[in-house]
Image (cartoon, rainbow, N blue to C red):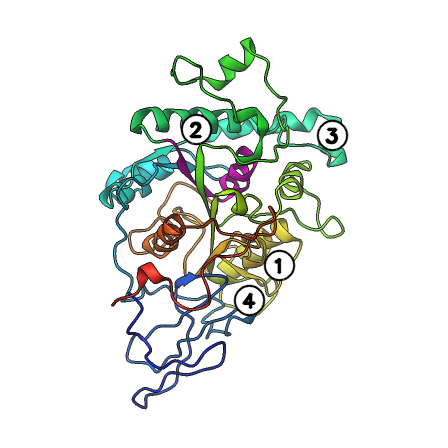
């Protein structure tokens, strides 16, 4: 798909395409990064560069407007159909989200992530949640481990992981597939990492071939590993993991308290980076570069807080810093990327499908599941699924992208 964009491009970081002279407006485009690669595209008749970058830290500085970047879908991105035999997708909702946010946001089923995936041939299943279910996380507050910051995913998130396990089994039963793709939105991403490695959920199916549809009920009558038992191999039911705007690690202890009571930090220490890449699991991490956080600055206000202030507060909660941090208005880019994963940065894409600070009103902004956005991460996902060798190096936990610098082969035109 990208093969004819820039013929004769010099290698590495610093080369401009030779094109007809036009005003130079350098803008980072929303597209995929393989091994933290950014490719800029031509739009609006502007002179642009097509460059490859080895590191997210070397991204070109875009032109910010009111500390925000605007989304524009690259013209070369086309709809990404599910390849034959693709595993079903299991969607893990983010903190505070309900299943309806992914099946019928604001009552609009046609605009949902599930429907947009279905149009492309992807079977998808959403972990069943209501917003009130998240109050169950508060149970961890009554433990000493929470206040000491020493918790695993138990007890605060055990209920969530049980539902993930049940949904995975349901997806396999419904489709006849052997594996699934986990797509975790926000906190659903780091909880997906926990499920992937937790020994408790790596049970074999019974000899008669029946599917364990209720993991919690089975646990009551069987000897299972305790919640939060770290495994050294990935769950065999998982082929790939995609995280959308996920805070992958807690803030540094010297800057901010881990509000998960240690659970998030335990997951990141137990399974750092693309931990199971060498054992056949493909990783894609996605984050928007959309809002720059600021606390005190001159700006005309239309309400109690402008978007930069909201971003400042959220980034501070995630990484202990807010001023000058950039991200999707909720999670900063610096916290969203897993080392060794296929990385995707999308300029102008927001964290959620809802109005900032609420789930009651559509913001009108694009998010990761919007119709003209999701192909930008589905493409890299398909690339990972089609690779003949697992992403990563020979040593588990030290994975790197298996795609060399340059353009994804399956996205190129011949």
Of callouts 3 and 1, which one flags the residue occurring earlier in the amino acid sequence? 3
* The quadrant where residue 16 appears: bottom left
The single residue placed furthest to the top in the displayed view is: 221
Q: Is residue 250 above or below residue 27?
A: above
Disc 2 versus disc 4: distance between alpha carbons?
A: 38 Å
Please name the residue that numbered disc 1 is placed on: 322
Of callouts 3 and 4, which one flags the residue occurring earlier in the amino acid sequence? 4
Of the pair 181 and 70, the residue shown nearer to us: 181
Q: Is residue 110 above or below residue 288?
A: above
Nearer the camera: disc 3 or disc 1? 3
Can residue 244 be seen at all in this image of the molecule?
A: no
Rendered location of residue 259, percent (x, y): 65, 40
Report if residue 52 lies within the magenta region: no
* The quadrant where residue 339 appears: bottom right
Of the pair 132 and 27, the residue shown nearer to us: 27
Disc 1 versus disc 2: distance between alpha carbons?
A: 30 Å
Of callouts 4 and 1, which one flags the residue occurring earlier in the amino acid sequence? 4
| Label annotation for residue 145 | 3
| Label annotation for residue 55 | 4
What is the span of residues highlighted in magenta in the rendered image?
A: 178-195
User: SS class of the residue under badge 2?
Assistant: loop
Structural crowding at the residue carrying mark 4, measured as other residues with C-alpha within 10 Å and reported as few (<14), some (14–19) or many (≥20): few
Please name the residue that numbered disc 2 is placed on: 130
């Amino acid at each position: 798909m990208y093969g004819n964009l820039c013929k004769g491009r010099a290698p590495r970081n610093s080369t401009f395409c030779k094109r007809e002279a036009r005003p130079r407006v350098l803008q980072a485009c929303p597209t995929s990064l393989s091994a933290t690669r950014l490719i800029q595209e031509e739009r609006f008749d502007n002179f642009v560069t097509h460059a490859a970058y080895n590191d997210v830290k070397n991204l070109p500085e875009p032109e910010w407007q009111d500390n925000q970047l605007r989304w524009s879908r690259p013209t070369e991105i086309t709809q990404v159909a599910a390849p034959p035999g693709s595993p079903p997708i299991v969607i893990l909702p983010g903190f505070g989200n309900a299943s309806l946010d992914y099946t019928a946001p604001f009552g609009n089923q046609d605009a949902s992530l599930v429907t947009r995936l279905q149009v492309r041939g992807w079977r998808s299943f959403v972990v069943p949640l209501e917003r009130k279910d998240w109050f169950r996380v508060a149970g961890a507050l009554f433990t000493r481990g929470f206040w000491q910051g020493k918790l695993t995913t138990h007890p605060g998130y055990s209920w969530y992981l049980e539902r993930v396990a049940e949904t995975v089994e349901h997806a396999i039963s419904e489709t006849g597939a052997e594996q699934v793709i986990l797509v975790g939105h926000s906190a659903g991403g780091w909880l997906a990492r926990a499920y992937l490695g937790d020994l408790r959920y790596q049970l074999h199916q019974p000899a008669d071939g029946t599917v364990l549809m209720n993991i919690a009920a089975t646990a009551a009558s069987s000897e299972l590993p305790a919640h939060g038992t770290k495994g050294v191999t990935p769950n065999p039911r998982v082929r790939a993991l995609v995280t959308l705007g996920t805070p992958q690690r807690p803030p540094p202890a010297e800057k901010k308290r881990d509000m998960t009571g240690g659970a998030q930090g335990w997951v990141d220490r137990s399974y750092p980076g693309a931990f199971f890449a060498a054992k056949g699991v493909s990783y894609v991490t996605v984050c928007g570069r959309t809002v720059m956080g600021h606390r005190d600055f001159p700006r005309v206000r239309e309400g109690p807080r402008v978007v930069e202030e909201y971003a400042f507060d959220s980034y501070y909660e995630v990484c202990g810093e807010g001023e000058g941090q950039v991200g999707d208005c909720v999670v900063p880019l610096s916290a969203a990327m897993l080392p060794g994963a296929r990385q995707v940065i999308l300029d102008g894409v927001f964290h959620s499908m809802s109005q900032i600070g609420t789930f009651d009103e559509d913001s009108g902004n694009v998010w990761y599941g919007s119709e003209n956005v999701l192909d930008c991460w589905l493409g890299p996902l398909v690339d990972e699924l089609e690779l003949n060798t697992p992403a990563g190096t020979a040593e588990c936990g030290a994975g790197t992208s298996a795609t060399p610098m340059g353009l994804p082969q399956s996205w190129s035109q011949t």
